[in-house]
Amino acid sequence: MNRRNILLLAVGFTSLCLAATALPGIGIAEDNPLIGTWKLNLEKSKYSPGPAPRSSTLNFVADGANLTNTAEGIDAEGKATKTVFAHIYDGKPHPTTGVAGGLYDSSTYTRIDAHTVNWVRSKDGKTVLTGSNALSADGKTFTVTTDGTGPNGQPIHNIAVYEKQ
């Protein structure tokens, strides 16, 4: 092997190593089973006190080691909704945009295990909702459990069941 080939191999190997270490979170997020589209199954879901939305679809996309979830749907009154959640698993509040009625303005996510995340929704730093996200072992069902206080001060306990599309 001549010097030129050795140099080219060294440069190529170094570039490959740099790329692999510079982007470690991308592989993690891309392998996340949440990535993709999820549709609300109203028959399996429970909304207390209700009423339930007419429809809801979640779209998770990779954002480095984190996820961005865009939730779009039609609320019980027939109005279109679109909320964007930054799933940053550092236990700190991050802005949540497009919340109907302005009930909350930030979300905090804490990973419990590979299939479970606990979260807190806050308005001006005050907790208004708590809950969890649970991914089924087969990766086909995503359940969002919500507890807290609604816009009229009424207690909320919702279980929203989504199915992978």
Image (spheres, rainbow, N blue to C red):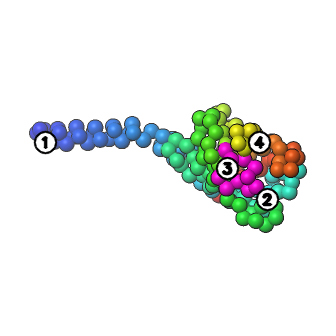
Residue located farthest toward the bottom when viewing the structure as drawn? 78
Q: Position of residue 137 (x, y in %)?
A: 67, 41
Give, as a three-letter code, the residue at label 4.
Leu
Q: Position of residue 66 (x, y in %)?
A: 55, 43
Which disc, if any, is residue 63?
A: none
Q: Nearer the viewer, residue 103 or 76?
A: 103
Magenta segment, which residues? 97-106
Lower position in the chain sequence, tag 2 or tag 4: 2
Identify the residue shown where x is 65% and y is 49%. 96
Which residue carries the number 1 mark? 4
> What separation in Å lies between label 1 and label 3 (alpha carbons)?
52 Å
Look at the numbered disc 1 and give the secondary structure of its residue: helix
Closer to the chain start, of discs 2 and 1, is: 1
SS of the residue under disc 4:
strand
Q: Quadrant of residue 22?
A: top left
Packing grade of label 4 (10 A; few <14, some 14-19, many >=20) is: many
Q: Which quarter of the figure is the N terminus placed in?
A: top left
Residue 115 can be seen, yes or no: no
**Is residue 102 inside the magenta stretch?**
yes
| Quadrant that contains the C terminus | bottom right
Residue at horizontal 29 percent and vertical 41 percent from the top? 15
For disc 3, the marked residue is 140
Q: Which amino acid is tagged 1?
A: Arg
